[in-house]
């Protein structure tokens, strides 16, 4: 039943005598066993391998500048459970961990910690040393180059990462800590820039001047995947455009400030109210600009007045209309969120230009107030504004509504504007096995709902620089159509502070020279290639081929649209494949009120507190009890159950060893199985055989939660029923042969249970393993069902005898007799199907219930004790 111990089979190695502490405890196991695992290199990935032996995991890199909470313990434990199972199943597990240092949290932390600000145009300073203490006034902070800033990020995050690594180690993650990476170090920047260059060269990446979602606080473009819809109050303002004949055409809008950006009115093609207007022009109020009335299917006849004002740009629907109806661009809102200070050329009337002067340079909010006041002053508002609540798009990290700003950005083709590529990405999704399966629909819904390519440029200081320069012609105009790319040998580069090959720094921003791209890549553009970064893509391609495509990507369901989809896009374009063959999607952690835990809500729980209170194995039990994809409540009751299980495992094992059980008694093959002669023991091993088969199947299907539940259920029956039934025989009360049988059954069961529990309870199981076996349980093989065959129906004996035991215990309780009190005689009535089973183990049942005489009788639907006579109480 499982791995044949080398110490037993065919060797002269002496059997190890169990060395059991007087008082087994969970306390102190984490430090002791983590040290042993490091020394023994239990979790090291063997690079001398081939792809068929490897199980590789693309582990989520946490943000080291942030803080961990119980949600991290939850999801990372679930991944680790699978890693441990696969390792014991014979796989060479590649289980690296990275640190996501590339992003706004790190940028802010470094700025505040050192008192520095980044300016990409600043020259690099060798051996730069930041101030000992940050200046109180940010205006007095050091302004440094991007390269110097990145160096400070690397220095500070090293300290942050030590704290994270210590916590993850305490959590028992079986990560190979030699295989770590950062998303902003030289290797990651080079890989990210190389991937970008490959996409440019293949036509998958391109630059374009286009309407872009823009966060005016962070002054950066925002991708579709980073949007968050929030309900906000607003109001419909109703006012008229005028036809050449003087007819009023009323529109209703929540954004009257965009009136000077209007390029058309639009209504549904079948709307009878507006059909006569299609193709004609109307004049805008206040600004006197003529615009055409257009027809489009997206116009909603039931919304407002049924005819909408198209502005460039109020939202992404405006962008769709603008593109499909080939309308002019009249953008007025800039990157700072303010209206242009220059009066636009399309406003030509004296009154219109005077009215625009009242908007020039204003914020969106102030411009809205000004337009509404002008409409009121000219008696153009039809009624009072109608208050509403509607969904408004925000950047997921921002606190002001997004604007749509026209700007030049870099994009990667993802199927948002290409039906063939969209089908290709949907097909990639079907190549991946999803756990749970229904999560694939979230991926497909996202792909099918894309309305544009992936915007990958960001207007931030810190990040992976976009590796591009642009030539300047003799008049100093940028040539965006012929960007200058570095050679791959030059990477990583920072175009903002380094000159391209063939140019001198003195030619920067000079006619006939060049200018460097100041933008950085979206953090997801780098995170999307974590399989490549960890797998040493284009650095050690032999190694990369051993791990790619990976076997598993574990992650949360909230970033399917970002990390998962982005990774699929990059692997598709760079490698022509999926990045991994399986994805395991974890749920969220909910507080006791069933609300998602988040730092912003202030309802997170600090991991160290939980680990100190309950111990690591208890926390892992809670995490592994939750199914993939299921949102799970933070429930201390589950921690208590897990702790009780781990303690019971220690004590039950100590009890078994106290009855003389050693590794010598483990059944490893059919010959050894001959010693198991007693029906109850054979029944136990029959059930154990079935358990191993079922649990293994569950693990193979990534259903570790059900595997744990099944193992736990068996364990409690083993301790509460079987052990109680065989105590007398284990101590020799029924002779040597019967004693040898029970010892073999107990040793085999304990050996198997330790391995079945090992992925979830790594500390308790390895502590016990080392009491009586050599090495670590985590270096042992996963148990198999081979080595013990039983006859049909034998497994039912344990269940039948356990029910009989429960009936006797119940009868004693009802008679208010202590369980240790002897029964001089009694009749046990059983269902007909159970009589033979109980009769075969009658001596065990009598010993366990202290029954001197027990008559069996057939009848009834459940076991029942009657006519019981008890011995006189002992003095």
Image: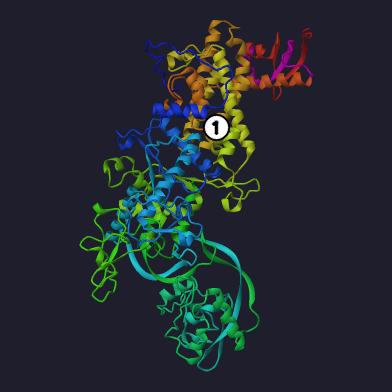
Callout 1: helix, strand or loop?
Answer: helix
User: Residue drawn 31% across and 44% down?
Assistant: 536
The image quadrant of residue 343 is bottom left
Which residue is more in the foreground, 104 or 297? 104
Q: Quadrant of the C terminus?
A: top right
Mark 1 neighbour class, 10 Å CA radius: few under 14, some 14 to 19, many 20 or more: many
Question: Residue placed farthest to the top in the image?
Answer: 735
Q: Is residue 605 above or below residue 717?
A: below
| Residue designated by label 1 | 617
The residue segment tinted magenta is 815-842
Percent across and percent down for residue 156 are 43, 47
Residue 660 in sight: yes
Q: Is residue 196 above or below residue 838?
A: below
Percent across and percent down for residue 764 are 53, 26
Percent across and percent down for residue 79 are 47, 39
Whether residue 817 appears in magenta in the rendering, the answer is yes
Q: Is residue 329 above or below residue 290?
A: above
The image quadrant of residue 307 is bottom right
The image quadrant of residue 794 is top right
Whether residue 750 appears in magenta in the rendering, the answer is no
């Amino acid at each position: 039943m499982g791995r044949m111990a080398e110490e037993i089979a065919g060797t002269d190695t002496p059997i190890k005598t169990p060395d059991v502490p007087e008082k087994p405890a969970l306390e102190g196991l984490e430090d002791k066993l983590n040290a042993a695992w490091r020394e023994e290199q239990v979790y090291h990935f063997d690079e001398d391998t081939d792809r068929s032996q490897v199980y590789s995991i693309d582990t989520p890199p946490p943000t080291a500048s942030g803080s961990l909470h119980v949600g991290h313990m939850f999801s990372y434990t679930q991944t680790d459970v699978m890693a441990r199972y696969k390792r014991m199943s014979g796989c060479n597990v590649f289980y690296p961990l990275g640190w996501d240092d590339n992003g706004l949290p790190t940028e802010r932390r470094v700025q505040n910690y050192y008192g520095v600000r980044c300016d990409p145009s600043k020259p690099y300073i060798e051996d730069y040393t930041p101030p000992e203490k940050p200046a109180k006034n940010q205006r007095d902070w050091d302004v440094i180059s991007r390269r110097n800033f990145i160096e400070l990020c690397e220095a500070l995050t090293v300290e942050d990462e030590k704290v994270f690594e210590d916590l993850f180690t305490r959590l028992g993650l079986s990560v190979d800590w030699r295989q770590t990476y950062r998303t902003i170090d030289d290797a990651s920047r080079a890989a990210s820039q190389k991937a970008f260059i490959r996409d440019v060269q293949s036509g998958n990446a391109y630059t374009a001047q286009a309407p872009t979602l823009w966060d005016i606080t962070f002054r950066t473009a925002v991708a579709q995947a980073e949007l968050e819809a929030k309900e906000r109050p607003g109001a419909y303002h109703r006012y008229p455009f005028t036809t050449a004949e003087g007819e009023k055409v009323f529109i209703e809008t929540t954004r009257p400030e965009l009136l000077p950006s209007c390029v058309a009115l639009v209504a549904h093609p079948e709307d009878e109210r507006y059909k006569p207007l299609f193709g004609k022009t109307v004049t805008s109020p206040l600004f006197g600009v003529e615009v055409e009335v257009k027809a489009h299917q997206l116009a909603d006849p039931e919304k407002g007045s049924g005819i909408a004002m198209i502005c460039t740009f109020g939202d992404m629907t405006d962008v769709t209309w603008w593109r499909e109806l080939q309308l002019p661009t009249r953008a007025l809102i800039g990157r700072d969120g303010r209206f242009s200070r220059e009066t636009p050329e399309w406003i030509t009337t004296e009154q219109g230009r005077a009215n625009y002067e009242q908007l020039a340079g204003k914020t969106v909010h102030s411009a809205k107030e000004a337009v509404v006041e002008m409409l009121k002053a000219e008696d153009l508002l039809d009624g009072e504004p109608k208050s509403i609540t509607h969904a408004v798009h925000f950047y997921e990290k921002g606190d002001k509504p997004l604007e749509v700003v026209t700007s030049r950005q870099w994009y990667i083709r993802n199927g948002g504007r290409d039906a063939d590529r969209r089908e290709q990405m949907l097909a990639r999704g079907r190549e991946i096995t999803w756990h749970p399966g229904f999560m694939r629909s979230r991926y497909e819904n996202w792909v099918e709902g894309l309305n544009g390519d992936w915007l990958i440029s960001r207007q931030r200081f810190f990040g992976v620089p976009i590796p591009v320069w642009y030539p300047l012609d003799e008049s100093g105009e940028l040539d965006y159509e012929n960007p200058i790319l570095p050679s791959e040998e030059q990477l990583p580069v920072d175009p903002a502070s380094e000159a391209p090959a063939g140019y001198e720094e003195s030619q920067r921003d000079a006619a006939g020279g060049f200018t460097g791209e100041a933008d950085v890549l979206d953090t997801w553009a780098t995170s999307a290639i974590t399989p490549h970064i960890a797998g040493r893509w284009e650095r050690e391609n032999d190694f990369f081929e051993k791990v790619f495509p990976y076997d598993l990507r574990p992650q949360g369901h909230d970033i399917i649209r970002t990390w998962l989809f982005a990774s699929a896009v990059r692997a598709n374009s760079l490698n022509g494949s999926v990045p991994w063959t399986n994805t395991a999607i974890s749920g969220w952690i909910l507080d006791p009120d069933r609300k998602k835990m988040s730092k912003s809500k202030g309802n997170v729980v600090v991991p160290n507190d939980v680990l100190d209170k309950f111990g690591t194995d208890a926390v892992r039990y809670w995490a592994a009890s939750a199914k993939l994809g299921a949102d799970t409540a933070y429930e201390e009751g589950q921690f208590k159950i897990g702790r009780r299980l781990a303690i019971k495992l220690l004590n039950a094992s100590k009890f078994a060893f106290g009855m003389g059980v050693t590794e010598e008694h483990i059944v490893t093959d059919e010959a050894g199985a001959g010693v198991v002669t007693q029906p109850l023991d054979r029944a136990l091993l029959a059930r154990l055989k079935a358990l191993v088969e079922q649990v293994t199947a569950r693990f193979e299907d990534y259903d570790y939660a059900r595997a744990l539940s099944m193992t736990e259920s068996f364990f409690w029956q083993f301790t509460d029923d079987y052990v109680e039934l065989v105590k007398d025989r284990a101590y020799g009360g029924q002779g040597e042969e019967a004693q040898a049988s029970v010892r073999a059954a107990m040793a085999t069961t304990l050996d198997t249970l330790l391995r079945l529990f090992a992925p979830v309870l790594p500390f308790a199981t390895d502590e016990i393993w080392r009491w009586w076996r050599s090495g670590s349980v985590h270096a042992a093989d996963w148990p198999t069902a081979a080595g013990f065959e039983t006859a049909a129906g034998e497994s039912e004996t344990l269940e039948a005898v356990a029910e009989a035991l429960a009936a006797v215990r119940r009868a004693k309780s009802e008679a208010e007799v202590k369980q240790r009190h002897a029964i001089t005689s009694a009749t046990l009535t059983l269902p007909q199907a159970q009589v033979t089973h109980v009769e075969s183990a009658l001596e065990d049942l009598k010993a366990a219930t202290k029954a001197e005489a027990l008559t069996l009788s057939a009848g009834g639907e459940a076991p029942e004790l009657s006519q019981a006579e008890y011995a006189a109480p002992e003095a």
